[in-house]
Image (cartoon, rainbow, N blue to C red):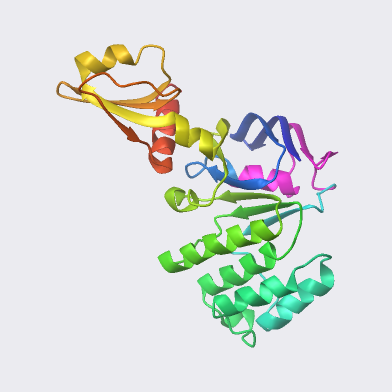
């Protein structure tokens, strides 16, 4: 559905994306993870046709994408997206009138769930509530691809939890490609199905979350015992303290030697170790 063919994007002398190849073929909730400035927003804007590639080609739904040929099936939403300053309930009705397939019943249920007053004007809302209204509008639109750039910015912990439930419910009702760029890794891990990690404008990893759950783990034990057991494994990070060694693995599972402890690796720790390892070898 979405394909990047050797895409590079430069802004003046700065390279935001560097020779990126990416293929998203199936529906799912994709988490797009990366440090600040890694290229996440640039990647999403290229998909939506907001900007053009310096080199290479972006394909969405079988058609090349440019600002002159933006895909109608892909919707890009920023957390600070502006809306017309009308009453929230009227905003929903206007979206339903303008967008074929807009799920007005879902949108109204979400207004009630999040205690949003449909009679308040958009500009009377707090930043977080504005973001939630924008999110409801976008999730009620059943476009083939939904691109959310830091959608929980300005939300407290309770609102973020509710947002994740909202996102998952929307996907269950209308399966499609949903790409969520976020820094709150362990929170999105509860609902994400697929993962894309980007660093310094390059794709480090594209994988199913189940694959990461199976292959990402840590081993801790005496260096003299553990080091030989790591031979042939993809070690994405190491920490040595005295005679002890902690190794972070993304590979097949092994039976640890006696005296070595094995533990799961959270998605956040996996991301950190993978990115740190990439930067150390850059």
Which quadrant of the figure has residue 24? top right
Going 20% across and 14% down the picture, which residue do you hit? 224
Q: Residue 51 at x, y = what percent?
A: 72, 46
* Magenta segment boundaries in residue numbering: 41-68
In the picture as drawn, the residue positioned furthest to the bottom comes out as: 119
Q: Residue 56 at x, y = what percent?
A: 75, 30
Would you place residue 148 above or below residue 249 in this image? below
Going 58% across and 51% down the picture, which residue do you hit? 180
Q: Residue 200 at x, y = what percent?
A: 52, 33
Magenta stretch: residue 239 in it?
no
- Please say whether residue 245 is visible from this viewpoint: no
Of the pair 49 and 97, the residue shown nearer to us: 97
Would you place residue 173 above or below residue 22 in this image? below
Going 74% across and 63% down the picture, which residue do you hit? 141
Q: How many marks?
A: 0
Left or right, 198 with reference to 179: left
Left or right, 235 with reference to 97: left
- Please say whether residue 255 is visible from this viewpoint: yes
Which quadrant of the figure has residue 216? top left
Going 56% across and 40% down the picture, which residue do you hit? 195
Image quadrant in which the N terminus is located: top right
Q: Residue 47 at x, y = what percent?
A: 72, 44
Magenta stretch: residue 58 in it?
yes
Would you place residue 235 above or below residue 192 in this image? above
């Amino acid at each position: 559905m979405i394909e990047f063919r050797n895409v590079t994007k430069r802004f003046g002398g700065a390279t935001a994306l560097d020779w990126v190849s990416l293929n998203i073929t199936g529906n799912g909730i994709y988490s797009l993870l990366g440090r600040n400035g890694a290229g996440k927003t640039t990647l999403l804007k290229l998909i939506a046709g907001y900007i053009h590639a310096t080199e290479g080609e972006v394909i969405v739904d079988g058609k090349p994408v440019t600002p002159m040929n933006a895909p109608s099936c892909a919707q890009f939403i920023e957390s600070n997206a502006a809306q017309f300053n009308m009453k929230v309930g009227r905003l929903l009705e206007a979206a339903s009138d303008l967008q074929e397939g807009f799920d007005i019943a879902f949108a109204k249920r979400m207004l009630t769930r999040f205690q949003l007053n449909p009679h308040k004007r958009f500009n009377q809302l707090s930043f977080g509530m504005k973001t939630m209204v924008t999110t409801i509008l976008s999730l009620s639109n059943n476009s083939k691809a939904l691109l959310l750039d830091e959608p929980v910015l300005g939300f407290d912990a309770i609102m973020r939890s509710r947002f994740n439930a909202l996102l998952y419910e929307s996907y269950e009702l209308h399966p499609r490609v949903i790409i969520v760029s976020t820094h709150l890794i362990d929170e999105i891990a509860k609902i994400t199905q697929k993962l894309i990690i980007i660093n310094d404008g390059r794709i480090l990893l594209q994988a199913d979350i189940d694959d990461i759950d199976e292959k990402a783990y840590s081993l801790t034990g005496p260096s003299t015992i553990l080091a030989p057991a790591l031979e042939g494994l993809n070690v994405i990070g190491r920490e040595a303290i005295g005679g002890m060694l902690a190794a972070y693995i993304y590979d097949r599972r092994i039976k640890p030697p006696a005296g070595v402890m094995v533990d799961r690796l959270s998605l956040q720790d996996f991301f950190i170790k993978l990115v740190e390892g990439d930067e150390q070898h850059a």
